[in-house]
Image (cartoon, grey):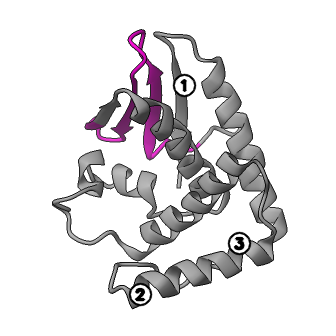
Amino acid sequence: MAMDPPADLHVRFKRHPDGSASLTGTRRDGSVTWQRQHGPSALVFPPHDLTHYAVETVLGFRGGFYGLLADGWEISDFAAPWPRGPIPEEALVAELIVGFFDVERRHGAPLTVEAFHAQAAQHIASRRAAGKKTPTHLPALTDDELDRVRACRAELLAQWTAVPAGGALDLRFVR
């Protein structure tokens, strides 16, 4: 009987009775990083972070948001004053892809792979022209990969929606 590989990170999304939400990451060594979101952020961040999970697991990212958390980054390291320094390339790519899936989810219409790549190229070029940190490239994604991410994200969002106040959604992140 095959056993699942050990998780690099146990991820818990909790829906608190007061309407807030929290994300907790427990690493293999037992150390923990967590953050609680209140108000509108409690509505935005769980779907965004679940989309990260879908993108990073389906596309095999090892050093995206969850990979960096598994490696010891704190959730607060992903915001100013950037205590760990610049976000690594793979995490920037993951964030760009997640951002496009977030837009797609809000607008209710999936992007074609061609539109996805065209918008990503435009986004990268505009950020580069403005002197902002941006990925140097985007991997050549396929329709099948985009569809698998969408299916995973839809399942995760359905699970999150079903979590009652005081309940949690637990996931395993394995690289």
The x and y percentages for residue 41 are 40, 35
Q: Which of 42 and 126 is in front in this view?
A: 126
Say which residue appears at 43% left-offset and 17% top-offset. Answer: 19
In the image, 167: left or right of 87? right
The circle on residue 169 is: 1
Say which residue appears at 61% left-offset and 62% top-offset. Answer: 100
**Residue 44 visible, this angle:** yes
Density class for disc 2 (Cα within 10 Å; few <14, some 14-19, many ≥20) is some
Boundaries of the magenta span: 5-33
Give the mark nearest the N terminus, 2 or 3: 3
In the image, 52: left or right of 18? right
In the image, 68: left or right of 155? left
Amino acid at pointer 3: Phe
Q: Mark 2 points at which residue?
A: 128
Residue 127: which quarter of the image? bottom left
Amino acid at pointer 2: Arg
